[in-house]
Image (cartoon, coloured by chain):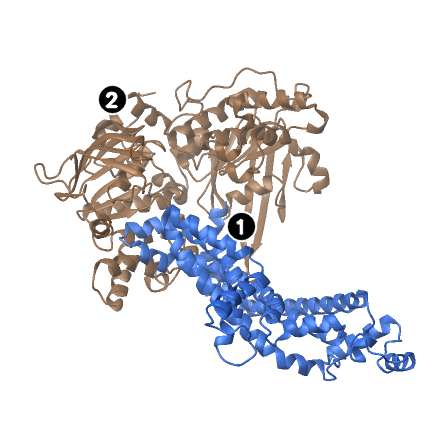
Chain colours: A blue, B brown
Amino acid sequence: MSLETLNHTPSTSAAISATTDSTAGSSRLRSVLRLSGLRILGAAGVLWAVATLAFFAMRLVPGDPVDALLGGPGNNATEEVRELTRELNGLNEPILIQYGAYLGKLVTGDLGNSYQLREPVVQVLGDQLGNTLVLAVLALASAWVLALGLALWSARGGRGATFVGNLLEVVSAAVPHFWLGSLLILVFSVSLQWLPATSGAPGIEGLILPVLTLAIPLAGFLGQVMRESMLTAMNSPFAISARARGESEVSLSLRHALRHAALPGIGLSGWAMGSLISGAVVVETVFARPGIGRTLLQSVLVRDVPVVLGVVVLVAAIYILVTLLSDLAERLADPRLRAA
Amino acid sequence: MSQTITNPNPGSEPVIKVRDLKIAFGPKNGATPTVHGVDFEIHAGECLAIVGESGSGKSVTARTLIGLTGANAVIRAQTLQLQGKDLRRHGERAWRKVRGADIGYVLQDALVSLDPLRPIGREIADSLRIHTNLSPAARTAKVLDLLEAVGIPEPEQRINQRSGELSGGLRQRALIAAAIALDPALLIADEPTTALDATVQQQILDLLAERKAAGTSLLLISHDLAVVGHLADRIAVMRRGEIVETGPTAQVLGNPQHEYTRRLLRAVPTDKPRGTRLAPAGAGISVRQHALIGAGRAADTTKDRTGPVLVAESLRKTYRNPDGTERVAVHDVSFALNRGQTLGIVGESGSGKSTVARMALGLAIPEAGEVRLLGNPWSSLPEKQRRPQRKHITSIYQDPLGSFDPQWDVARILSDALPDASRLSRAERRVEVIRLLETVGLDASVESRLPLRLSGGQRQRIAIARALAPGPDVIICDEPVSALDVSIQAQVLDLLDELQREFKLSYLFISHDLGVVQHVSDEIVVMEAGRVVEAGRTTEVFANPAKEYTRKLLAAAPRLATTTGGRE
C-alpha cells in the first residue's frame, strides 16, 4: 500500500498541477506562508519560555544581586547604600512586576544594563558574539571535514578500518572539552611549543587549538551517524546497480554514498551549533579567549543577572535560527523532502 | 513467438558459456556451498530463463557473471567465458570493464535500485561516463535516445526526475535504459517484473523481447514460470543450487520431466478452478480438524445466518492533495460479500482498491454510502460502538513484517489478538496460541521466535493466525501473497481455502494479480481509477469480459505459454 502511494502521488499531483497551475501555485504559496507563520510564532514562544525560565532560575541562585551592583561580593557598602541601590534598580518591587518590566523591555530589544560593567547588555554581548560565532562556525566546519573523512575512509576499508573508525569516533565523542583542551595545550603549547596556549590575540594560530577542542568531540558524534548511513548506502540495491554499470568503489562513495552520508549530518548541524555555543563556555575559559561563553560564566559567578539573561535569550535565538537554516539546507539536499 | 528455436546459430560461439560453476560462501576452507556445478550457455539473440524459488542460487549465479558475487564468495568453474574470453581470472579492474559495457544487469528490486538523490538521467549516463569518452552534451543526447527507446514518455522532463517521482514501471524502464546504454552483448534481468502491476509487467516483458529481437542475449531470472514463458527460448529450473531440468520452453512447460518442475507449474494459480490444491499435499500442512478455537465461539449462532455478511453501498472517498486540490480515490463502489465466499477486487496501483479495504475495515469513513457488517450498520457507527464488533472482521496484509511489533515474539503477537485475552490465564492463552499455530500449519516451536527470524511464508501464516484469533466472519486480504514466491504463494492460497471451508469464512480478496484472484474468487469486482468497471461471477467475467479495461487486464495476466489442460 505504501508503495502504491509512493508511486502515484507524485505523478497524479504533477498532472493536476499541470492543468490547474495557477490555483495550485497560489495554494502552495499559501501553505508555505502558513508554515513560516507557524514557525515564527513557535520561535517567539520558545524565546518567551526561555526568557521566563532563565528569569526565575536566576532568582533561585543564592546570593544578593546588590553585591554585583556594588562591585562584587566582599564589598563593604553600608546597609543604607545597599537599600538605596535596591530601590534605584527596582529590586524591591514584587517579583511579578519585575518580570513584567523585564519582558516589556525585552520586546523592544532592551536587555538592560550590566550590573558590573555598567554598559548596556546589548553592547556587551555585541562585542563578544563575533568571537564566539567565529569559534563555533569554524569548529562546525572542521567537525564536518573530520567526520566525512573518517566516514569515507572507514566505510570502504573493510572490517579493520570499520573497527578503528568506530573506536576513534566513540572515544572522541566521549572526551570532555576541558580535558581535551588541557591535553592539547600540554602537547602543542607546553611540550612542542608550536601553538599559543591562549587565544586572546587576533590571528589564526590562537584559534587552532580552541577550534580543535570543540570540533573533535562533535566530529566523533557526526562521524558515527555519517558512517552508518554511508554503509547503508554502499550496501543498498542502487549501489549494486551502480557497480553493475562498472562504477569503481571510490567513485561510488563520492558520487552516491557521500550525499547519503551528509544528509543526517545536515539535520544534526542545527543541534550541533547549540551544543558548540555551550561548549564555548568551557573552551573560552580554558584558552582565556573572549566570547559570550566566558562572559556568561563570569556573570553567573557575580550574579550579573541582566547579562546572564541576555546570553540565554541570545543563544536561544541563535539556536532557533540555526535549526531553521539546517531544516532548509536539508530540504535543499534531499529532493524527497521537497516533494513531500 | 519462436519458442521452438533453441539455438539460432548452431555451432557459433555462445555469448556466455558456463560449465560446472560452483559457488560457496564463507572462509576459504569451510565455505558453505550454495551453487553445486551448473552448466548453461546463451547464444546471441537467445533468451535463457533460470527459474527457481528464493534461495535456489539463481540470483547468485547471475551475479557471478558480472563478478559481484560478494567479497566472501569462493567461485570455481571449469568454464566461465564471455564471448570467448575467460572470466575466471578477472581482477576488479577487468571486471569493471565488463560490467555495464559487455554485460548489462537489471537488479532485482526496481523500486529501490535507483539512487533516490540523483536524477535518472545521471544514473543512466553513468555507464556512458565510465566506459566512453563522450562529452557531457553527447551523453545527454544519448540518454534522451535511450529513454525514448525504453518507452519513457516526455524524456526531456523525465531525465531530470528522481526515482521518487516515477512510478514502478518507469523506474524499471529507467533501469533497463541504464543497462542497455552501451548495447551490451548480454542483458541479465533479475526478477524484472516483481512488484509491478500486471499491465506494466507485460510492457516490461515486451521491452525485453524487443532487446532480444535486436540481437541481445538475455538471461532472465524469476521464480515464476508463467512470467518467463512468453519470452524465454529455453528454461533452466534451479533448485538448491542445482539445475534439475533444462530444455526448450515448450518442452519444460508442456512436458516437465522433473517432479520439482511439475510442482512449480502446479503452483501457478491462473486458470486453476476454485478449490484446486496448488501445492502438493504435505508441502503446506493442511488444517487439522479442530473444534472452533476460542471460548464462546462454538455458541456463536451468527455463523449460520444466511445473506451477505459484508455489504458496501455507493462508497465514496476523496483525498486532499498537498496543494489543496482533491482527488477522488473511490467513486460509487458497491458490492456484497456472501458467507463462506470470496469476493476478489482487482485493479492496478492507485485504482482505489486499498481504500475500499480500509473502509470495509472501518479504518476510513466513507463520505457517502455505507458499509454494513452482518446486516448491521458498520461504517456509520461511532468508533466506540464499532470496537466491540471488530472481532467479526479482521485483515491480512501484503507485508506481515510491517504489521508485527518487531520486539514481540509469535506467542505475544497471537495472544494479543485473542478476544478477552485479559480474562484468560497464562496457560489458557498458551493453549490458544498453540491451537492457532497448528491451525495454520505451523509447529508450536515457533511461538518463541521474533518476526524477523521467520521466513516469508511463515510470517504470512502468523498473520493469518492472528486474523483468525478473534474468530472473525470476514477477513480482508490485501495483497496477501504478492510478496511471496510462487510455490510459497501456492501453500498460503491452499491454506486460506481450507480455512474458509472449515470456518465458513468470507474473504474480501484484494490483489493486482489476476491469476491469483481468478483462482480464489467466487465473484470479482474490477476497479479502475476509483470506479467499478465490471463485476460478476469470476468464471463469467474471465470468460466474457464486457469492458475494454477488463480485456486489457486479462491479456496482460501472466499465463503459462502452453496449454496446461490435463495435468491436474
Residue name at image x 58 percent, y 49 percent: B317
Mark 1: few, some, or many residues within 10 Å (few <14, many ≥20)? many
**Three-letter amino acid code at disc 1?**
Ala
Q: Name the residue at 60% across, 71% down.
A: A284
Q: As drawn, which residue projects farthest toward the right? A: A80
Between B193 and B407, which is closer to the camera in this rendering? B407
Q: Quadrant of residue B473?
A: top right
Q: Is residue B152 visible to the viewer in this orientation of the structure?
A: no
Please tell me the numbered disc located at residue B402: none
Labels 2, 1: front one: 2
Residue tagged 2: B257
Residue A237 screen position, x and y as percent: 37, 48
Compared to residue A225, the image places residue A77 above or below, namely below
**Residue A30, located in which quarter of the rendered image?**
bottom right
CB-based contact (under 8 Å), mark 2 and mark 1? no
Label 2 or label 1, whichever comes before in sequence order: 2
Judge whether B558 appears above or below A21 on screen: above
Q: Position of residue A273 (x, y in %)?
A: 57, 66
The residue to which callout 1 is attached is B329
